[in-house]
Amino acid sequence: MPGLLKYILYPLLLYVTYCGLLFVLQRQIIFPRYQIPQPSQTDQQVAGIEKIWLDTDNGKVEAWFIPSDVTPSAKSQPAVIFGHGNGELIDFWPEELRKFTRFGVGVLLVEYPGYGRSTGNPTEKSVTDSFIAAYDWLTSRQDVDSNRIVFIGRSLGGGAVCALARHRPSAALILMSTFASAKSFAKKFLVPSFLVRDPFDNLEVVKNYSNPILIIHGKHDTLIPYSHGKTLHAAARRGEIITYNAGHNDCPPDWDVFWKDVEGFLRKNGII
């Protein structure tokens, strides 16, 4: 009997140790901020960017605003709030996202706590608080139409903007290569889902969201499988899905096509 007990207890002890280690390290996996090269002062080199520092309970968070150069200053413009992937920084996105301004749309890029030059530590709560602060700053501007704000998130950024959608209204959601929930990955790591500290339950948000949602996903995505995009689309009340022949990091494969698709979505729903 003692021998049999040993064969039962040892694997159990190893599994509990594994679960405990993953519980402690999971935020380094979800938010691999230390693996990203520290940014240079690129914000000084990109014309037209307004640099903002947001005060949150977790520290100071950086955000960049690119106002539209199409809408006359006397009128209010629509705007997007963008959340980037977990292995990225806001520094990576201004040139591509500036194309929103061709449609008369301003762009607010929000950094995550602990990323780039921002202070604090990234968690679902701290990211949510940062995006709420960014939203409140944006809607306080006289040149922004608070009824035409779109949340757009890529990968983990989809979780960030869905978390924001729990607390603040928006005209539409655009989710690129986004997961249904972080808990859904627990099986992949062979751990119970209750150990996930930052669940990012995007599926619940999408189910309760009443405005238009555009889901964009690569059919060959192995990091966040295409099934996540289909699940989100099926749950959306007013959802549409665009499937690209791409994986995760190469989605979209053709940015010109992407911008035509996004422009069509915004026009169809009266945002531009």
Image: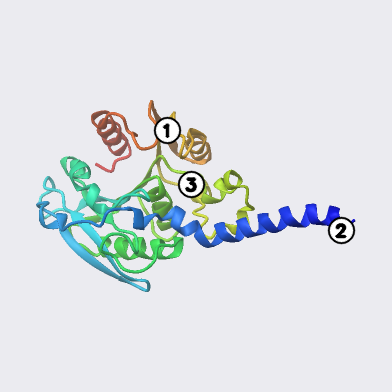
Q: CA distance from mark 3 to mark 2?
A: 52 Å
Q: Quadrant of the C terminus?
A: top left
Nearest the viewer among 170 and 112 is 112
> Mark 1 and mark 2 in contact (Cβ < 8 Å)?
no
Residue beneath the point at 25% across and 57% down: 38
Residue 83 drawn above or below residue 100: below
Q: Is residue 173 left or right of residue 179?
A: left
Query: Circle 1 sits on which residue?
Result: 241
Residue beneath the point at 16% across and 40% down: 102
Q: CA distance from mark 2 to mark 1?
A: 57 Å
Q: Is residue 239 left or right of residue 49?
A: right
- Secondary element at tag 1: strand
Type of residue at label 3? Val
Labels 3, 2: front one: 2
Would you call the spot at circle 1 few (<14 residues within 10 Å), some (14-19), or many (20 or more)? Answer: some
Q: Quadrant of the N terminus?
A: bottom right
Type of residue at label 1? Ile
Which residue in the rendered view is the most extreme toward the right? 1
* Whole-percent x, y for residue 234 in the image: 52, 36
Question: N-terminal of the two: label 3 or label 1?
Answer: 3
- Residue 2 has which mark? 2
Query: Circle 3 sits on which residue?
Result: 206
